[in-house]
Amino acid sequence: MAPSQLEIDLLAVFIETAEELRHEPFFDLYENTRYSTQDKKLYVIEFGDRFHFRSALIPFRRMWRNGEDSYYADILDLIVKYEPNAIGAAASFRDRHKQLETAPASSHVASPGKEVVDSWLYSVFVHTNLKRSRTRAEGYDRRVFEENVRKFGHAWYEYAFRETVRSAGWLYFNILDWLALPLFEHWRAAKSEPSFQISYAFGTAKREKMPDGTVIIRRSSSLYGVDETLIQKFFRLLRRFRNLKDIFKSLRMSDEELLKCFIQARSIRELIKAAGFEFHLADYYKPKDGDVYETATLHDSVTNEFGSYCSTRDWLIIASKGTLRSWSRQFRQLKALLVDARDDADARPRGGIVYS
């Protein structure tokens, strides 16, 4: 059964929206949310940049809100329609999202996550709704927001909002990587293309060259800049490369050692050797019982292939060819981002996936 043009476009717009959200600084930079209490009362709470968070809410709402073209639940229905093998994964994502919506938003805010998010979005962000009738139970307006602030305290109320958005966002990224992108690539291989090019309407970089040759420069203010050490930048960028992040954890190195060896290494093989491991390539390797220290599978969203690797207690790492290819490609990409500021997220198109 071939998808309709509308179905292709809906999946494409979900991918576009999820990729845009993933490259928002709210998810990309260290938020460093933390708080301290004194005598069982909140003393101080710290958040990341408020402009980063407000920016992330725009694409977030398009996947959170029922009725939007990229509403996550409708996209799951679409995926399952064409990929019956995805029923189990889709059900798991639904359950996790439902729990996020219905469970208390935090230990200090008893309201369900959906109520917290919607009350912020439709009381002080998208709308204030003072002219609308409050006949519906889910009706929110500026006065409701004020009531909740008095009830929970602004600090905990905002904390619950931010953390619920963050958790839902990471759930959407998993749907993107594990279900949406593989189906989209399958459709494209069958010559089923969207009626538009996946891109970002408001741009993703300080400097971009358009297809017609026009150069757009978006000037930023140092007031909203983020100071980073090299090690902070390294681990911020590493979050974009999940397959690398997993193998780096297996190398049993401190953060400082890992960064130093990564900079010095010319390839993933050299890095593994520098960590004290031997590397072996094998697509079908079965270690002895009790010999395995860690084993994992990975998915390469570029090739839509699955790979595997394991590390043993006697300091061996055995990986399949597909795994090595994925590691090597991401190693080169991360290296380029780390050593050349012009290729960092704020200076390059954050397209991630731009289809032409």
Image (cartoon, rainbow, N blue to C red):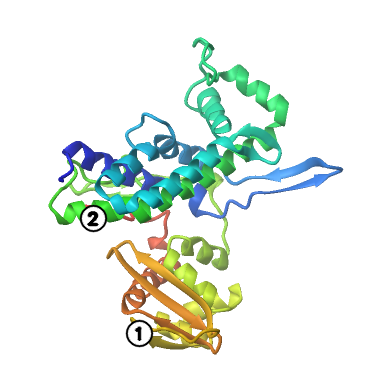
Position of residue 317 measured from the top left corner of the image (x, y, whole percent): 46, 84
Q: Residue visible at 36% across and 29% down?
A: 67
Relative horizontal placement of residue 67, taking residue 11 as reference (left or right): right
Relative horizontal placement of residue 13, taking residue 123 as reference (left or right): left
The answer to whether residue 315 is above or below residue 43 is below
In this orientation, does residue 356 appear?
no
Position of residue 180 measured from the top left corner of the image (x, y, whole percent): 32, 50
The answer to whether residue 321 is above or below residue 98 is below
The answer to whether residue 205 is above or below residue 154 is below
As helix, strand or loop, the secondary structure at mark 2 comes to helix
As helix, strand or loop, the secondary structure at mark 1 comes to loop
Closer to us: 235 or 161: 161
Q: Residue visible at 41% across and 80% down?
A: 268
Q: Residue visible at 83% across and 42% down?
A: 40
The answer to whether residue 186 is above or below residue 259 is above
Q: Amino acid at mark 2?
A: Glu
Relative horizontal placement of residue 181, taking residue 128 as reference (left or right): left
Residue for badge 1: 282
Which residue in the rendered view is the most extreme toward the right? Answer: 39
* Label located before the other in sequence (2 or 1): 2
Question: How many numbered tags mark residues here?
Answer: 2
Residue 27 disc label: none
Residue for badge 2: 185
